[in-house]
Image (tube, rainbow, N blue to C red):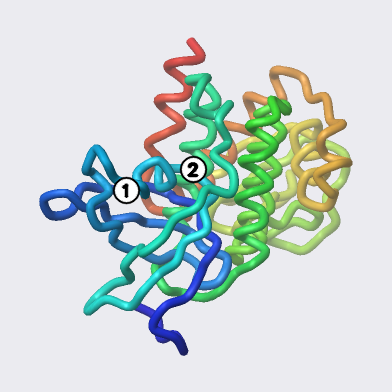
Amino acid sequence: MPETKFRSFRVDAVVLRHSDYGEADRLLTMYTRQLGKTRAIAKGARKIASRKAGHIEPFTHVRLQLAKGRDTFIVTQADTVDAYLPLREDLVLTSQASYVMELLDRFTYENDTENTATFQLLTDTLSRLASKADPWIVTRYYEMRLLDYMGFRPQLVECANCGSEIKAEDQFFSFTAGGVICPRCGQGLPNLRSISVETLKYLRHFQRSSYAEASRARPSPEVQQEAEVLMQGYFTYLLERELNTPGFLKKIKG
């Protein structure tokens, strides 16, 4: 539990997940504007008459009053800022939002540090998904920004091996090197993935553009598939394990 100046204080949070705790409580894992990722106990939240229960569901933006407990924070008050209701009414959108949550959860540690930019990215992404914006663009933009904030920005402009400028032709991508590998270097390096010039163009665009600019992109289905597979491979390498939600999302999309 991080040190704070006050015994009770307010935080803006998005609930990432929760689990049963004790006889009637819930243990919340949440990402906050003020503390980064942290946990708190919502006492009595599983009781039918609980006033907190409806405010602390996953991917809810909530304002919490927290008090210091012995080992973790205690939720004393909860008010919903945005429930992102459309995300709960469509299974595909629910799965997309769950992916957004899982990715952030896997990349962050509890009580690491305040990260206002990451919190803003999270709430913006949930709002975009809830507004029925193109989920492929929303998700790829989120991935590229999150990699920036977590310190894993992929090198997409120069060869990650020799440093030469990447030309407008098909290239390779190295998870180990964290970026694009030029055709010349690609002849002698192991464990490379091919990446087409079109897919590279869109990933570069998302990396350097605002969301307003990125949202105008119209990639082909082939580029969407290639970019998605490439990003999932990169995340699996960085996190040293596969994510759970992409497989489920693939199943429900058919």
Which picture quadrant has residue 137? top right
Disc 1 target residue? 18
Check disc 2 and report the residue beneath it. Answer: 59
Point out the tag, 2 or 1, that comes first from the N-terminus. 1
**Amino acid type indicated by mark 1:** His
Label 2 sits on a secondary structure element that is: loop
Residue 162 in the figure: left or right of residue 226: right
Residue 202 vs 109, above or below: the answer is above
Residue placed furthest toward the bottom: 5
Can residue 187 be seen here? The reply is no
Instruction: Please name the residue shown 75% across and 42% down the image.
Output: 203
Q: Which mark is residue 95?
A: none
Label total for image: 2
Q: Residue at x 68, y 53 (%)?
A: 145
Residue positioned 80% across, 31% down in the render:
198
Q: Position of residue 67 (x, y in %)?
A: 36, 74
Q: Label 1 near label 2: C-beta < 8 Å?
A: no
Q: Crowding near pointer 2: few (<14 within 10 Å), some, many (20+)? A: many
Please tell me whether mark 1 sits on a helix, a strand or a loop.
strand
> Residue 134 at what x, y percent from top left?
72, 26
Q: Position of residue 165 (x, y in %)?
A: 85, 56
Q: Residue at x 48, y 10 (%)?
A: 254
Residue type beneath disc 2:
Phe
* Residue with the most extreme front position: 49
- Quadrant of the snapshot with the N terminus: bottom left
Q: CA separation, marks 2 and 1?
A: 11 Å
Decide: is 129 above or below 205.
above
